[in-house]
């Protein structure tokens, strides 16, 4: 195949080029004169990759990817220059003397010069390029990086490795613009084969466990990661440098996976970033990974966190945390993610303190293999999602894998197995089942509970915080309010109860009777006084009882006639009868309220003589306790009801006022929005002015079309076209050369015809209207020949006076409904 | 969605492509327009045709623009984006 493919590019016809490209799995467009160079270059790339794959075991440097990267990136043209020169040269030759090529990166310029000279040198050049490229642009393939690594490692040159990484990162940036699914697939194969090399090489060096030959690249990548990670952790800085190239390789290999299918890869990238030590190059790699992080956003927090926690375990101390922080910061994660990371790191650290050194490696590996899952992350994500809201995606991803989260932890204590083999979570779980010992299981539960505890604490915290500020506030006040209301109620009840006095007052009445009694009836004897007092008391009681019965509704009679009173007294005793009249006299003369009131026949009759008195009435009815209580209760309730009613009325009034107020505010806000939109429209059309080219030959007339049709739907009747005219005039308010406007009502596109006095005015109107926005649609303007205009609108022949907008308040604009869906505006007039 | 487009792009997308000159395509500078016209791509629809011939592959189109028409990276990106948007709207 290599021989067949090695036919010189310039001999390929278009069809052959096409078929060659198809053979590589591409689906290119037709190969024409102009597209030929592009496709030739692509074919060259593919061929070189192919050759490189075949030659790889021989330790040939990777030129293909370098040349791939160099294609469009300006930075890495150098290496690809000679390689691409031949390809492009072929294409360049047919179009000679094109100065535009000088604009391209210098390589092309060189190409055009050297192209014709080196058709035969093409293959040689191609073969030369790889070796050159391998030296110049490294880091993309594992081969050369390893090849470079070994002497470097022996030399212990960290800076060299750093430099490589640097270039690699540069190269990745160059590679980024290429959408290279093809390249990815190619690279995958090549990488998968290449990885075996470093494995064997590293295997000799490291005492660690053998690598695991797994079918999927992913796993192998994970393997490499873990082993390298372990090396790094175990050996420290000395082993870091040699790891870098392979790390970069991984990273570079992962770069083509920018299709984002492979979360584990991107996670590995993260691992690369975080685990590689804190040297200058970290920034490069981070910057390199930054765009990728933005791509693999859902994964990055997870992987960053896992990386962070891993680092915490492996590299005890603040270094890991510093790494986490830097990784997070460099990856431009938000604070919440940092929080999660540190929390995860802390948890990871806490849990893994018991682990021995080989264990972190497997934790790493398992964590890596749990692409979307890392234990602290899953839980924390779910808990913090509500707060951050930025990791909802992660939650979705994690959702299914929450259970498998535990398995990595189990692995941590298990023997080094073919543990990370299983890519699926179920397999991992099975492994955990197999390999879990009591200790691991306990540890797992401990870890899990530990995880869940802080997670739940966080959850609770958030819940509490959510609930307490709002609910607690009102609940507290509500309870207080209810308490005071109840107290008040009972207080009022008691007072009212007391107000309904009954027998308790009789003493007062007695007292009040006694004093005036001394004044007026001083001449009477003591016995008579006592008799009178007793009579009065008895009368009082009887009357009070009667009144009480009357009040409480059981009896209908309130007053006692004099005769009945006399009869009652007589029943009590004969002595009362005599004293009855004097008592009555005393009551009459006594102005104060003694509990008995004398009532005559009529309502206002003067009671000067006892003969006028017909009825006796008690002013202080004596009621039973129950009756009193009932009355008090009723009274209090009525009063409370009135109070509540009053409060409700006040509330209603307030609410109504508030409603009106907000409505007015809303209206003004809408109006301001409209104004702002109008201003935006005018500003945008100022920016978007395009000159119309065919301006010269005739008298131009601007011809506005295309979005003035919208108001049709909303305006009824004949007014909309007037509104449009007004709008146009307002927009061109500084233009006094418009003499005629006609709105074409039957036009589907919304054509409006405007006649201006001269081409200058027409140009002004064009500038003002073209590219402006009207009712959410773009307005475009075309010039029209004057004779056509007059043919269409003969009435415009005589128009010579400039038109002005009818009023100054932009009413027509306000009638328009903008596309944002504002409600119908209430424009003026 | 329409808010972040440049006015030029919006203008290009809001109308049929018609017989617009290739300079109307967003991202095509004056120089690039001259180059394109020299190569025979004097109308926007011809450039669109090239874009479609390359199977609407933005990267390829950009490469071609840079290599064969002397566009800068930025110009190539803008043009391919403009044509891609046009295709999304109208095809």
Image (cartoon, rainbow, N blue to C red):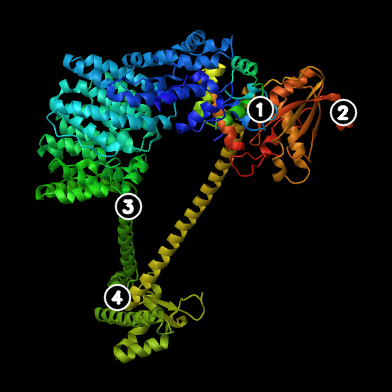
Distance from the alpha carbon under mark 3 to that under mark 4? 42 Å
First of labels 4, 1 by sequence position: 4
x then y, percent, for residue A313: 16, 34
Taking the spot 48% from the left edge, 29% from the top edge, the residue there is A21
Image quadrant in which the C terminus of chain A is located:
top right
Residue that badge 2 annotates: A790
Q: Are marks 1 and 3 on the same chain?
A: yes
Distance from the alpha carbon under mark 1 to that under mark 3? 59 Å
Residue that badge 4 annotates: A503
Q: Is residue A735 above or below residue A342?
A: above
Distance from the alpha carbon under mark 4 to that under mark 1? 96 Å
Distance from the alpha carbon under mark 3 to that under mark 2? 79 Å
Residue A622 can be seen, yes or no? no
Dot 4 crowding, Cα within 10 Å, few <14, some 14–19, many 20+: some
The residue tagged with tag 1: helix, strand or loop? loop
Distance from the alpha carbon under mark 4 to that under mark 2? 110 Å
Q: Quadrant of residue A583?
A: bottom left
x then y, percent, for residue A526: 24, 78
Residue that badge 3 annotates: A477
Taking the spot 21% from the left edge, 33% from the top edge, the residue there is A226
Q: Nearer the viewer, mark 3 or mark 4?
A: 3
Dot 2 crowding, Cα within 10 Å, few <14, some 14–19, many 20+: some
Front one among A771 and A73: A73
Q: How many marks?
A: 4
First of labels 3, 4 by sequence position: 3
- What is the chain identity of the residue bearing mark 2? A
The residue tagged with tag 3: helix, strand or loop? helix
Image quadrant in which the N terminus of chain A is located:
top left
Residue A572 lies left or right of residue A25; in this view the side is left
- What is the chain identity of the residue bearing mark 1? A
Distance from the alpha carbon under mark 1 to that under mark 2? 26 Å
x then y, percent, for residue A759: 79, 18
């Amino acid at each position: 195949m290599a021989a067949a493919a090695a036919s010189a590019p310039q001999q390929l016809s278009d069809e052959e080029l096409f078929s060659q490209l198809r053979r590589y799995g591409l689906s290119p467009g037709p190969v024409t004169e102009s597209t030929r160079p592009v496709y030739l270059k692509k074919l060259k790339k593919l061929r070189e990759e192919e050759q490189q794959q075949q030659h790889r075991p021989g330790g040939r440097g990777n030129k293909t990817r370098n040349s791939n990267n160099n294609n469009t990136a300006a930075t890495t043209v150098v290496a690809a220059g000679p390689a691409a020169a031949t390809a492009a040269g072929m294409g360049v030759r047919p179009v000679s003397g094109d100065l535009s090529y000088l604009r391209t990166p210098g390589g092309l310029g060189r190409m055009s010069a050297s192209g014709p000279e080196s058709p035969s040198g093409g293959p040689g050049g191609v073969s030369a390029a790889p070796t050159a490229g391998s030296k110049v642009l490294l880091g993309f393939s594992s081969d050369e990086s390893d090849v470079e690594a070994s002497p470097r490692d022996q030399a212990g040159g960290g800076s060299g490795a750093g430099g490589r990484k640097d270039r690699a990162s540069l190269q990745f940036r160059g590679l980024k613009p290429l959408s290279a699914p093809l390249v990815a697939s190619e690279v995958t194969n090549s990488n998968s084969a290449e990885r075996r090399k470093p494995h064997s090489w590293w295997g000799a060096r490291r005492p660690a466990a053998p690598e695991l030959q797994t079918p999927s690249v992913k796993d192998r990548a994970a393997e490499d990661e873990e082993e390298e990670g372990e090396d790094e952790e175990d050996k420290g800085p000395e082993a870091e440098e040699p790891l870098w190239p392979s790390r970069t390789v991984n990273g570079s290999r992962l770069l083509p996976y920018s299709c984002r299918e492979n979360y584990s890869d991107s996670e590995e990238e993260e691992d690369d970033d975080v685990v590689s030590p804190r040297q200058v190059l970290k920034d490069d790699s981070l910057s390199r990974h930054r765009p990728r992080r933005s791509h693999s956003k859902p994964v990055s927090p997870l992987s960053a966190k896992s990386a962070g926690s891993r680092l915490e375990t492996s590299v005890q101390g603040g270094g890991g945390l510093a790494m986490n922080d830097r990784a997070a910061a460099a990856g431009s994660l938000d604070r919440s993610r940092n929080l999660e990371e540190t929390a995860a790191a802390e948890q990871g650290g806490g849990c893994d303190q018991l682990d021995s050194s080989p264990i972190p490696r497997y934790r790493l590996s398992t964590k890596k293999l749990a692409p979307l899952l890392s234990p602290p992350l899953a839980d924390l994500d779910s808990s913090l999602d509500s707060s951050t809201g930025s990791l909802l995606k992660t939650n979705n991803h994690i959702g299914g894998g929450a259970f498998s989260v535990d398995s990595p932890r189990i692995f941590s204590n298990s023997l080094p197995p073919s543990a990370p083999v299983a890519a699926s979570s179920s397999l991992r779980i099975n492994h955990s089942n197999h390999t879990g010992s009591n200790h691991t299981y306990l540890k797992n539960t401990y870890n899990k509970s530990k995880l869940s505890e802080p997670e739940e604490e966080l959850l609770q915290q958030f819940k509490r915080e959510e609930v307490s500020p709002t609910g607690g506030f009102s609940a507290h006040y509500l309870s207080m309010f209810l308490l005071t209301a109840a107290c008040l109620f009972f207080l009022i009840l008691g007072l009212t109860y007391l107000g309904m006095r009954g027998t308790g007052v009789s003493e007062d009445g007695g007292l009040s009777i006694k004093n005036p009694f001394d004044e007026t009836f001083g001449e009477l004897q003591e016995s008579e006084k006592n008799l009178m007092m007793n009579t009065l008391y008895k009368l009082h009681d009887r009357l009070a009882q009667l009144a009480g019965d009357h009040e409480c509704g059981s009896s209908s009679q309130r007053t006692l006639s004099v005769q009945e009173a006399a009869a009652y007294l007589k029943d009590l005793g004969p002595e009362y009868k005599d004293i009855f009249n004097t008592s009555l006299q005393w009551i009459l003369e006594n102005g104060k309220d003694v509990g008995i009131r004398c009532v005559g026949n009529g309502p206002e009759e003067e009671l000067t003589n006892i003969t006028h008195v017909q009825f006796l009435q008690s002013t202080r009815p004596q009621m039973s306790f129950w009756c009193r209580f009932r009355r008090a209760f009723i009274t209090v309730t009525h009063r409370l009801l009135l109070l509540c009613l009053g409060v409700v009325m006040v509330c209603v009034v307030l609410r109504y006022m508030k409603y009106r107020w907000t409505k007015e505010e809303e209206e003004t806000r809408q109006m301001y929005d409209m104004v702002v939109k109008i201003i935006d429209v005018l500003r945008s059309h100022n920016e978007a002015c395009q000159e119309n080219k065919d301006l010269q030959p005739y008298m131009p007339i601007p011809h506005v079309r295309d979005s003035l049709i919208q108001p049709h739907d909303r305006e009824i009747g004949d007014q909309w076209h007037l509104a449009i005219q007004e709008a146009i005039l307002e927009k061109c308010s500084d233009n006094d050369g418009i003499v005629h406007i006609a709105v074409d009502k039957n036009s589907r596109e919304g054509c409006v015809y405007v006649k201006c006095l001269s081409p200058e005015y027409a140009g002004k109107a064009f500038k003002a209207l073209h590219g402006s926005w009207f009712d959410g649609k773009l307005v475009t303007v075309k010039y029209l020949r004057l004779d056509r205009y007059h043919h269409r609108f003969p009435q415009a022949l005589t128009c010579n006076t400039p038109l002005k907008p009818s009023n100054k308040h932009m009413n027509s604009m306000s009638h328009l409904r903008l596309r944002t869906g504002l409600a119908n505006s209430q424009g003026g007039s | 969605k329409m808010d972040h487009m440049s006015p030029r792009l919006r203008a290009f997308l809001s109308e049929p492509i018609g017989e617009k000159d290739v300079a109307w395509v967003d991202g095509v500078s004056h120089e690039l327009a001259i180059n394109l016209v020299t190569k025979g791509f004097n109308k926007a629809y011809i450039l669109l045709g090239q874009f479609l011939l390359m199977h609407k592959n933005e990267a390829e189109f950009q490469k071609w623009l840079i290599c064969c028409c002397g566009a800068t990276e930025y110009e190539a990106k803008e043009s391919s984006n403009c044509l891609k948007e046009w295709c999304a709207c109208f095809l």
